[in-house]
Image (cartoon, rainbow, N blue to C red):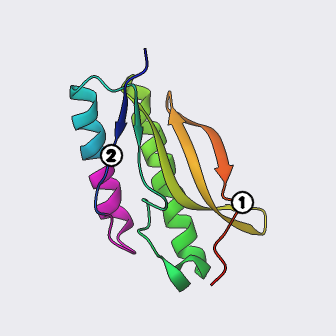
Amino acid sequence: RLKIALCQIDPVVGDIAGNTGKIIAARTEAAKAGADLCVFCELVICGYPPEDLVARAAFQRDCRNAVYELAKATADGGPAMIVGSPWKEGEALYNAALLLDGGEIKAVRRKVRLPNY
């Protein structure tokens, strides 16, 4: 049996450190409830919609560092997490969902169908 916690926090656009803190707090509560997996919303790391912030190299770096920090937190044997974040691979920048478990990033899935405004 797999117990999944749908973690609906209120991320603030651009507040990567604050959002990371909210994610950790939600994971802690989900662990107390016996969750095996915590699922967070699209772009939870940076808040939605990040608009032009995603074009900044420092912003991309800070988002990536937050994902690594959260991945390390899963080394405690608690619930795995799926988080959304901007994710750079080479020169390409993606809106990605990342599976974090056992202290590392286990999988990355890139959004394929982007809205056309």
Give the residue displayed 58% in from the left and 80% down from the top: 56
Please state which amino acid type lies under the numbered disc 2.
Cys
Disc 1, SS: loop
Q: Amino acid at mark 1?
A: Val
Q: Name the chief secondary structure element in magenta.
A: helix
What residue sits 48% from the left and 40% below the top? 71
Along the horizontal axis of the image, is 11 left or right of 92? left
In depth, the one of 7 and 21 nearer the eye is 7
Q: In this figure, what is the number of numbered marks?
A: 2
Query: Which element type, helix, strand or loop, lies under badge 2?
Result: loop
Along the line of sight, the residue nearer the viewer: 31 or 75? 31
First along the sequence among labels 2 and 1: 2
**Image position of 76 with respect to 113: above or below:** above
Q: Is residue 81 above or below residue 86?
A: above
Figure quadrant of the C terminus: bottom right
Q: At 61% across and 56% down in the image, what residue appears?
A: 96
Res. 27 image quadrant: top left
- Per the rendered image, the range of residues in magenta is 11-23
x, y percent for residue 38: 39, 37
| Residue 51 image position (x, y, % from top left) | 52, 82
Q: Is residue 116 left or right of residue 99?
A: right
Callout 1: few (<14), some (14-19), or many (20+) C-alpha neighbours within 10 Å?
Answer: few
Q: Which residue is mark 2?
A: 7
CA–CA distance between discs 2 and 1? 23 Å
Residue 97: image x %, image y %? 57, 50
Relative vertical location of residue 65 with respect to residue 14 in this rendering, above or below: above
The residue nearer to you, when weighing 64 against 54, is: 54
Residue 18 highlighted magenta (yes or no): yes
- The tag on residue 6 is none
